[in-house]
Amino acid sequence: MEGVEIKLSCLKHHLQTLSNGQIQENGVWRVIGQEQDGCLLIRWSSLIASHEPATIIGLFDVTSTSNQFQVLYKFSCVKNVIQASINATKSVLVFVTKEKDVVNCNESENYAWYYKVFLTKINSNEIKPIDCNKTRQTMVQFLYRKKGCSRDRFLVLTHQDSIQLYQLEEIKPVDEEDKCVDQENNTDAVLIETIVRAFCWAQWDAIHQSLYFIHYRKPPPVPVEGEVQDDETELAPTLSALQFHDDMPHETVLNTPLNLPGMVGEESLIEEGLYEDVPVPLRVHDGLLDVTVVSDSKGILCICHYYLYQPVQPPASDMLCDSQTVHFAYSVTLLHHGQVVHCVMPGVPFSQASTLRPTFTMQGDQHLLVYTPGLFVHLLDIGPNHEPCCHIALSSMSDVAPLSSSSSSRLVKLLSNSSFYSEQSSINNLLLNMTTMDVITLHVTSEHLVKAFKCEDAILENKLSILHYFLIHVGDTNLLTELLIPLAKNCTDLNLPKLMQEVLVGSAYASTLRGLPTDAVPLLDLLPLTTVSPSTTMQIKVSPTTRLSMSLRQEDLWNPSVMLLSPRQRLMPYRADMWTALWDVLSAPKESRFRPATVAEKLMVSLVCYQPEALSRCSTPLSPGGPLMGSGGTLSDLAMITGNRAKQITDPLPFYEVESSAASKQEHVISVNLREVSMHLLKRSKGITSPMQVHAVATRYAAAQLESSYHLCHIVTKSSAVDTVHQERGFPLVDGLEEGKRRVLFALMERYNLAVEMLAFPLPQGFPSFMAYLGYRTLPFPMFLQYVQASVLQLQVDVMKAIMADLPDTGEGLTKKLRLLQILPRSRGKRLMNQWSHPASLMIRAREHALNILSGVEGAHARGHPHRLRNQSINRGLAAFPSADRLSPLDTFLDLLTAKASLAELDFTLLIEATMASTEDFID
């Protein structure tokens, strides 16, 4: 797979090949414009017939299959053409020159720069001035239309002055004498209107035919009782957007206030020479305001602002030197989400920061790629499918960005809907290095994300974001397994449960999304998506060598929908374009997602009273014919997953998926999750979908929880290198493991169990017993008891039988058995005590039997004590303890018991055998 940034070709050499040697290699090259179809306008200097240098304007038509190159205009001398635009029919060219005024300046004074606009027809030697001698930066741009039109229009943008709209008109002859006028070149530009007065920044969006500009206006008045409104209110910067149409006037579709650091006032004068002419994308601004708007037809609108600052301002007389450090910062206003992402990197040397130019471009339709050569690569998750979160930061390493040797180079986005680009890269995200004329692709690949995840210095938030990327946006389970397999190397890492929780939540969400009906998709906005909180401030190390770190935080905008023109207010109501898509995103209801902690809190209470031995399978949702199975049949998916899961994964789990109890804890957890998720969707869907869709989504999500839990358990087993194919599973597998491998497996399983319990996800059947036996074989016995008392390990009947059989019946083994039996639930302890044929068991059962009789508990015999013949018991008792008066302490005790209960309720054999066992020395 290709790297993050790969050199594709040198545009200059490609053009020289197309021109058959007509273009000199020593010419000065520059791209001066790009049109909607991707065609590039190029200026270069070459030698003419008189061997004098001259300037030529050409068009590289990337839309044709042969990538044609056409010379549009030749000057007889060198002209500093900074920008140009051509109409849709490729017949009229308008361009801007930047020249020095040497007439009115003395030798000791600086030259003044003047911008001049000219119009010419292709294959014509005549040029017509349109707007000359502008001291402010001036750019031009033709408007493109979806339908054919006889008259072309173009914009003239003059910084701090105006934005004017011109239209091409054919000059008709007045009388017969003027018929000899060359009609092919008889074209003039007529000013139609001045669209915008003063503005400080503007950018043209060629794809959507939209114009963004920043201007100053008074904020809307806020009436306050008892106060007089001040007419001298300070002007506030505002970003507006104009949408141009084919047959209708343009309309203002956006007005949003801005709070961008480093902005200058409306009346501040721009020093000469501060202008940086940026023809691709077409922008008009001074060097003090670096703003870029990135948009997408799906309703994505990002306002990106880059700036430098110092927290403590130096005195006005002090100038920044190269050895001082500044804060490198940028902000991205996500208008479609109503949020702002702030990124600050302190401690950057001023010599380096002053030459940096961040590049903002979309990668796919869900991420904004921010690339700063020599510092970092950011992948911001800002797509419209879910709220912005899980942003990824990568260091700008040599293998990630091989073209970052010249950090001052400006990379600009190319419109890559052409054959020239598609033949050289399958990634539709191409950039042009304006300095070297190299066409490159900027793309974060999966290999670099895997490498960043495995980096030793990677922080937890970055790892969680990478897991989110592979789970939600890529859906590659093989890459996910590759990331988690090395977990065994750091099995004691405290962050492992958080990583596992992200895998559980992300896998459940992605599994629910697959195959979901279209009318149920809106309910996905209410399901858990990630464990990362969008409001969390991230501290990211971006460069291990320079020890630079970065803080990333988000904040909400106040009511962003009022800044946008609603679809019913448009010139053509409900026109389908980017702005209606943006309105739909902003007007969508923002409801809170379901929190797994809600189920976890309720399970803490319900599991205290949970008694698997007392429940019946007919009361659980996974049971065939259970009470919930008749409500539409969708709950059969849960049982289907349990039965068919072994077919999906080749390697089975290290234990058998069976439960010894009548009803498993897994089904109880699924039942609670299903109920809570259904109630959450019903309360917050607000009638968007039907209750049947709510039930279907809740059922699918409950099934996805079990599936993701099973899959993560499989990955954990694979990470610990436990062979589950060629070895017997269950308790024999634990007995056959080496000590070191057993400890690693227990550490990973312990963290897996913690992650599942905190999210209230269901565990695979058989896992609690396997985990308990693994802990018994791994941990020292006192620590094992602590795990059991803390409810981390559960002593089910099958585990206790294995432990009881493993421990000896004498000495320390007997003490351990008695200690374990004491901490078991009452019913489970009785069951095991009755099956244990040992004197200690007789004594304990007899004492409990006598206690029940003396305390007035009826039915003691029916509670599990075996029935014995009373006559044989009495005879054995009298023979065992004879006395002169045929009375003994045992007889006295038995008489006391018969006075409290009937003879049918007494187990004389149990009492006598326990009395006889008490005389034996079996403890030692």
Image (spheres, helix red, strand yellow):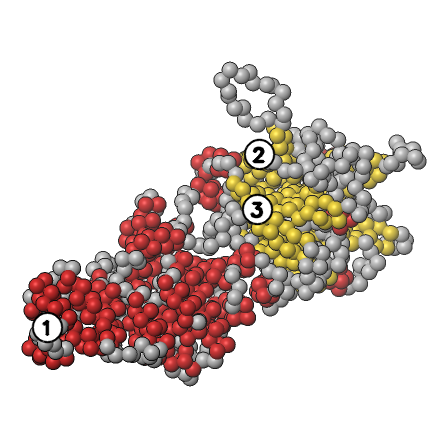
Disc 1 target residue: 887
Residue at 14 percent across and 68 percent down: it is: 893
For the N terminus, give its image quadrant. bottom right
Pinpoint residue 403: horizontal percent, then vertical percent: 72, 60
Name the element at disc 1: loop
Query: In this view, which residue lies farthest toward the bottom?
Result: 726
Pinpoint residue 88: horizontal percent, then vertical percent: 63, 48
Q: Earlier in the sequence, mark 2 or mark 1?
A: 2
Position of 325 with respect to 658 (left or right) is right
Residue 553, label in figure = 3
For the C terminus, give its image quadrant. bottom left
| Number of residues whose C-alpha sits closer than 10 Å to that of mark 3, classed few (under 14), some (14–19) or many (20 or more) | some
Disc 2 target residue: 257
Residue 480, label in figure = none
Residue at 75 percent across and 43 percent down: it is: 276
The Cα atoms of the two marked residues, 3 and 2, are separated by: 20 Å
Position of 353 with respect to 394 (left or right) is right
Pinpoint residue 267: horizontal percent, then vertical percent: 71, 28
Q: Amino acid at mark 3?
A: Arg
Q: Nearest the camera: 269 or 142?
A: 269
Q: Quadrant of residue 864?
A: bottom left
Q: Quadrant of residue 727?
A: bottom left
Name the element at disc 2: strand
